[in-house]
Amino acid sequence: MPRINLLPWRQQERARRQREFGLAVVGAVLAAGAVTLLTSWTITAAIDRQNDRNALLKREIAALDKQITEILDLENQKQRLVARMEIISKLQRSRPEIVHVFDQLVRTLPEGVYLTSVKQTDKRLEIRGIAQSSTRVSTFMRNIEASEWLTNPELQVIETAKSGNGSEFTLFATQKSSEPDVPSGPSRKGPHVGGKS
């Protein structure tokens, strides 16, 4: 039986397989590199797009925050203006009242009583003065109680004057508001409202 030497064929087959395996490995490496590179580009592009969106959102949020701040400033200005308008309206309504209050102070002041100061805080009046006697202070308080523009006289202090002439006194009274009296009749309207002292 003849002998056949298959060694060169096997070596050639092994070399061919190694070349094919090498080409397959190189192809796989190239394919993996291409996929990796494509994936990296895709992810980078997605990140860039998202960063652009985030930057746009930040700009829009900053613009909205600025608008909100401006709106809040406008609201504060509006509240301050409304408060000022209310104060001005209140002052305009009460402007004629002080004239009546001074008129009533003069009308209710009995003979022998002299005022040294009058201080008003809101509707409350602090009246300081000198009287020849405590009886005249009592008369003054009764006149205030009967007044159309003053009420609730409260004697705070009465003491002998430092000069020795008469008594120094401090009393409080409350200014009546004219607003509730407006619907009661036309007699309350007009500048000639006198006291009943």
Image (cartoon, helix red, strand yellow):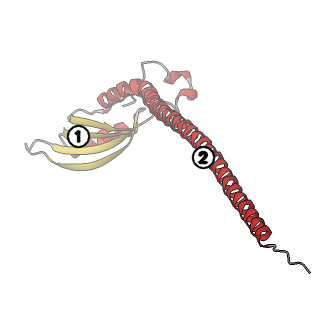
Quadrant containing the N terminus is: bottom right
Q: Residues within 10 Å of mark 2 (few under 14, many from 20)?
A: few
According to the picture, the residue beneath numbered tag 1 turns out to be 128
Judge left or right: residue 23 versus residue 132: right
- Up/down of 114 relative to 35, above or below: above
Where's residue 43, x and y in %? 63, 49
Splitting the image into 4 quarters, where does residue 4 fall? Answer: bottom right
Q: How many numbered badges does the structure rendering display?
A: 2
Can residue 182 be seen in the rendering of this structure?
Answer: yes
Outermost residue toward the right in this view: 1
Q: Residues within 10 Å of mark 1 (few under 14, many from 20)?
A: many
At horizontal 67% and vertical 50% (from top left) the residue drawn is: 34
Outermost residue toward the front in this view: 2
Can residue 194 be seen in the rendering of this structure?
Answer: no
The one nearer the camera, 10 or 146, is 10
Quadrant containing the C terminus is: top left
Q: Secondary structure at mark 2?
A: helix
Whichever of labels 1 and 2 marks the residue nearer the N terminus, that label is 2
Q: Secondary structure at mark 1?
A: strand
Q: Amino acid at mark 2?
A: Thr
Splitting the image into 4 quarters, where does residue 113 fall? Answer: top left
The one nearer the camera, 41 or 81, is 41
- Pointers 1 and 2 in contact (CB under 8 A)? no
Q: Amino acid at mark 1?
A: Arg
The one nearer the camera, 193 or 52, is 52
Judge left or right: residue 11 versus residue 167: right
At horizontal 7% and vertical 42% (from top left) the residue drawn is: 163
| Number of the label disc, if any, that sits on residue 44 | 2
Outermost residue toward the bottom in this view: 1
